[in-house]
Amino acid sequence: MGKIIVPQAKEALERFKMEAASEVGVDLKNGYNGDLTSRQAGSIGGQMVKKMIEAYENSIK
């Protein structure tokens, strides 16, 4: 992850990442996950973006 501007957000971002990983069937460990394939990492990132877009769309309704 990039630089976190609000340190308190780090824990929330970690939970969000773990939730997204679970939803796409990728088992993340706390700490180092460098053994993930590109496909697995991309699936997690894609799921996170999808959830952020959904949250934004719901907030403007």
Image (cartoon, rainbow, N blue to C red):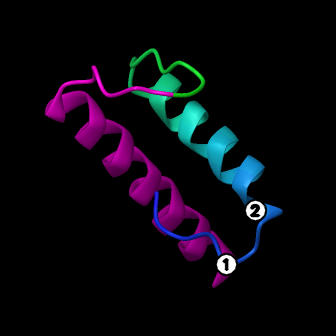
Residue in the foreground of this view, choosing between 35 and 44: 35
Write down the residue under mark 1: 5
Q: Residue 54 magenta-drawn? A: yes
Magenta residues, dominant SS class: helix
Viewer-closest of 56 and 46: 46
Tell me whether the residue at label 2 lies in contact with that at label 1, contact meaning CB atoms closer than 8 angstroms: yes
- Check disc 1 and give the amino acid type: Ile
Name the residue located 48 percent from the left edge and 21 percent from the top edge. Answer: 28
The boundaries of the magenta stretch are 32-61
Which residue bears the numbered disc 2?
9
The quadrant of the picture occupied by the C terminus is bottom right
The answer to which quarter of the image holds residue 17 is: top right
Mark 2 crowdedness (10 Å alpha carbons): few <14, some 14-19, many ≥20 = few
40 inside magenta stretch: yes
CA gap between label 2 and label 1 equals: 8 Å
Give the left or right position of residue 39, taking residue 13 as reference.
left
